[in-house]
Amino acid sequence: MYSGFSFENKVVWITGASSGIGEALALLIAARGGRLVLSARNQDALEDVAERCRTAGCPDALVLPLDVTDYDAMASRVASVLQHFESIDLLINNAGVSQRSLCVDTDFSLYRQMMDINVLGQIALTQAVLPAMIARGEGHLAVTSSVAGKIGVPMRTGYCAAKHAVMGFFDSLRTEVAADGLQVTTITPGFIRTNVARNALGPDGQPTGKEDDDIESGMDVTACAEVIIDGFENGLPEIAVGSGPEMGLLQLKREDPNATFDALAKMAQRTREAR
């Protein structure tokens, strides 16, 4: 277990901050006295979140538009943050997109999108931030993975591959930077009520615009963010968050992998029959 992270007066950079978990985290961190850098592609939405963060207690919320697939822009964005705040205490790699399609129906380009957005974008920004943290001898890096980063589920082959990849990368990074005084946290949400299903990409790489019953009945996003904040404050290197039966799969996978595979194969069969 790490020492607990205190958000007061700390510089926290959140990607995917324009909605969902990123937005909810920003508002809670603002109320705890954190100093925020808010990044996503939608500047108008970021400005709205920033204004609410200022009202919540963060007078200096920096809006920094960023497309995480623009890898060449990472160094300049990091320089902008360091020029504004002089340091970065916590980077939360939260940007990402999900998928809803069977492998057999999926255009290969979708898999490239999954990796570019959900994996390589997180790695590129993390690499750009690392030197400044190592030079200070302190800093905290985090990534929002998923229960799908631990379990393979139907209709999400690309998403599961990407989320497994970031779990592996950040678990490995944790071992490398411990001697530098840095900490690494992985976050594994289950079904959280956000726009993740509507924004999920279909077999052609375009958003489906469809709801998921599992997501709609999932955990409230603010409650989710509160669990994540508590995890940081209590020094957890891995934060599992969710309130549905999907969370039980994490333990079942460890205790009885075969039962997990059987249960998910039945889920896949039901999905195929409903199509």
Image: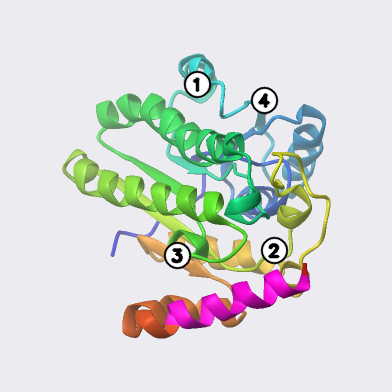
Residue depicted at 39% across the width and 77% down the height: 253
Please name the amino acid that badge 3 sits on.
Ile
Residue 49 is tagged as none
Segment tinted magenta in the rendering? 260-274
Q: In this view, does 56 lie to the left or right of 111?
A: right
Q: What element carries label 3?
A: strand
Q: Which of marks 1 and 2 is in front?
A: 1
Please tell me whether residue 77 is drawn above or below residue 221 in the rendered image.
above
CA neighbours of label 3 inside 10 A, class few (<14), some (14 to 19), many (20+) = some
Residue 71 is tagged as 1
- CA gap between label 4 and label 1 equals 13 Å
- Label 3, on which residue? 239
Please name the amino acid that badge 4 sits on.
Pro
Q: What element carries label 4?
A: loop
Asked whether the residues under the numbered discs 4 and 3 touch, taking CB atoms below 8 Å apart as contact, a structural biologist would say: no
- CA gap between label 3 and label 1 equals 27 Å
Residue 85 horizontal/vertical position (percent): 51, 25
Residue 146 horizontal/vertical position (percent): 52, 60
Q: Nearer the viewer, mark 2 or mark 3?
A: 3
Looking at marks 4 and 2 on the same chain, the residue that comes earlier in the sequence is marked by: 4
Q: Is residue 145 left or right of residue 237?
A: right
- CA gap between label 1 and label 2 equals 30 Å
Looking at marks 3 and 1 on the same chain, the residue that comes earlier in the sequence is marked by: 1
